Image (spheres, coloured by chain):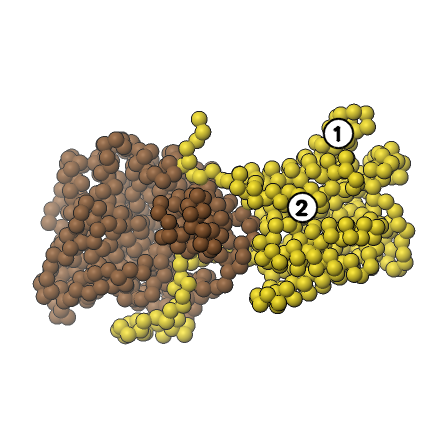
Amino acid sequence: MSFTTFPLGGIHPPERKELASAVSIEVMPQPQRVVIPLSQHIGAPCKVSVEVGQEVKAGEVIGTPEGFVSAPVHASITGKVTAFTSVLMPIGRMVPAVVIERAANHPVEAWQPAEDDKDYLKRSPDELKGRIKAAGIVGMGGATFPTHVKISPPKEKPIDSVIINGAECEPYLTADHRVMLEYPESVIEGLKILMTILGVTKGYVGIESNKPDAITKMLEAAKGSNIEVRTLQIKYPQGAEKMLIKSILNREVPAGGLPMDVGVVVQNVGTANAVYEACRYGKPLIERVVSVTGGGIKSPKNLKVKVGTPVSQLIETCGGLKPTAGKIISGGPMMGFAFYDLNTPVIKGTSGIVVLEQKDATGSDKFNNCIRCGRCVDACPMGLMPLMLSLFSEKGHYADAKDYHLFDCFECGSCTYVCPAKRPIVQQIKLAKTQVKP
Amino acid sequence: MLRHRLNLKDGKIIRKIMEAGKENKLIVSVSPHIKSSESVDKIMWTVTATLLPTFVMGVYYFGPKAVIVTLLCIIGSLLSEYFVQKLAGKDISLKDGSAVLTGLLLGMNMPSTLPFYIPLLSSFVAVAITKQLFGGLGYNIFNPALMGRAFALITWPRAMTTWAEPIANFTGMDAKTTATPLGILKEQGLDKLLEVFGSKMHLYSELLLGHRAGSLGETSVIAILIGAAFLLLRGYITLRIPAAFLAAVAAGAWVFGGKQGIFTGDPLVHVLSGGLMLGAFYMATDYVTCPTTKKGQMLFGAGCGLLTILIRLKAGYPEGVMFSILIMNCFTPLIDRGFRTEVFGAKKKA
């Protein structure tokens, strides 16, 4: 069978999904203490709306959004606000955070739905959008762009299709796979809600062919609807929005443009699930499924975790590290960020904790001169010439890099993966981007 | 790209977890966190290994002298690389295989009858001047092995065009000298060539097998193709440059190569003889000195082919592969600039 995919570039790193893909989602016990960052999204950070010493219930707003591109933050456990602090996020930025602790003698209280609106599909788009905004939903694939903003395109950009991104093309990660397998109806209902809001009649779910069980489940759940479940060829970075749209609809998002320029909105599987829970039960985004996997962890699992739980506790729940562990990553190994500190909390965009073994992980190895072999050119899904960007950045010729479409690079890392000279191309590109204006 | 010591001050949990971690050290560096197992060393040594059949055939036809010339080239390359890097205070990179490969390729491009100093001095020009003085691996403009050979050809024209008759003998006796097929073609024409080789079919088969005078590694087309096939299958090279190169030579030979006017030439003789196969598959495809984009590579290959046939038919030398590749090397930066890739989502021309 031949499945569709995007035409330019792409790579096939070892998938390593087998480590956790067959492990059912396990609800992790509520932690005693959570640290909830006030900025878990792209856009303006939240303003704290609680005080130290205040009792809060799970699901209560603790940070209110400032500005349109922002999303509220909620308490993920019931307890007392004990401190305001700041935490080091994997991207290397200090972010203000709220610490909530549950007294040792206090019973664990889970979030309870206040309502069950079975007729959610009959609500007005604005009503549904309001629920999504109130729930603080952001893109859960890792980009953390506020969802209510993404589904509010300007009038001059008519949308005709919504795509749910189930490609999960990053190696190791299995969270989206498990969500599709275990909550297929929620994901499909979430998509229907998004279609209702955008007034769209056609919905798609794109899944790579390495998840046949999820495809079967999603096909069943989508039966009798206007939703097409599409099997895609395995190729990284299929889950990048522009690649996914090309794979499914054969539309090319213009360079420098957004999916809405070609009439498409893309949302992650986890996001669709959260949208459903928010619109039906009013559930805020206070927990998510995280794959804790990799060759360096004792028993890989898919955990349903409260936002704000320290990463160290996830690792402990999965049996701890093996002696061979060499690198711990937030997200996938291609685009994720290495942790400096295992106290870092899980946030809305944490799709996985990947523990690589020393032998698999890249480090501060020396790199060689570019031998101009052109492998990066062949691997680039955006049709760029990464070798030139790398060389220009190395020599400080940032303006020349811009001339070679620096800002069309979305840092998927394919070039760096294939580079035989082990050049840190993505890093050089990131540096160049900070040195010139787009 | 820093290697941090993990912060252990908070809580027993982390300490307990980290006790399992090797030396309590985790790597922190920028994405991507995994890389393919491909490396420069692996590429260079693999290409070197695929030249083995060619080298073996060279030794088979030209005897122990072929081994000596090749070894001198490799030793000269390694010494040149070592001394320049030492003088420049750079890391010594002998183990990356690129100097060995350059030496071996240079050897494959030389006749077996040379005095010892020619291979040594040529490899100095190849590695020290053409490669290291331009900035080392990756920064050279010209193909180092071909530059070394060009230097030798111009400096010692007689020695570099004295070809031993290919006889499979291992006595070390001096073989008779003779002319290359292209030399005969140039001086005396196709009829004489056919007379020497008997029939056309015999000429083709001898060219394929390599039973003819020429440089050590250029005569056996079959041996070269075995190595090249491996490189193609592994994806180390593509057909873009070799195919365009061979096609251009064949077309040029067919159109302009005949005595009875245009379209009467024999393309196969031109394609199978001289250093074309070695040049097309091993020299023109040198990563550093060829363009990086698909269109650019095809243009580069075609340019090499057209220059080759121009030199073979109209210029003073019987063979033009070396000069054509070196000339096209000059155009590589220009081609790369002019034939950039098309960015995803770029506005299509109407």
Element at badge 2?
helix
Identify the chain drawn in brown. A
Lateral position of residue B225 relative to residue A15, left or right:
right
Q: Where is mark 1, residue-wise? A: B256
Q: Which chain is yellow?
A: B
| Residue B189 is at least partly visible in this image | yes
Mark 2 or 1, closer to the camera: 2
Q: Position of residue A120 (x, y in %)?
A: 16, 39
Does residue B235 lie above or below A423 as drawn? above
Find residue A250 and report its image quarter: top left
Q: Amino acid at mark 1?
A: Phe
Where in the figure is residue B43, as x and y percent of width and height? 60, 55
Q: Label 2 vs label 1: CA separation?
A: 23 Å
Residue A12 visible: no
Mark 2 neighbour density, 10 Å: few (under 14) some (14–19) many (20 or more): many
Which quadrant does the N terminus of chain B fall into? bottom left
**Residue at the spot x=23%, y=42% of the render?**
A149
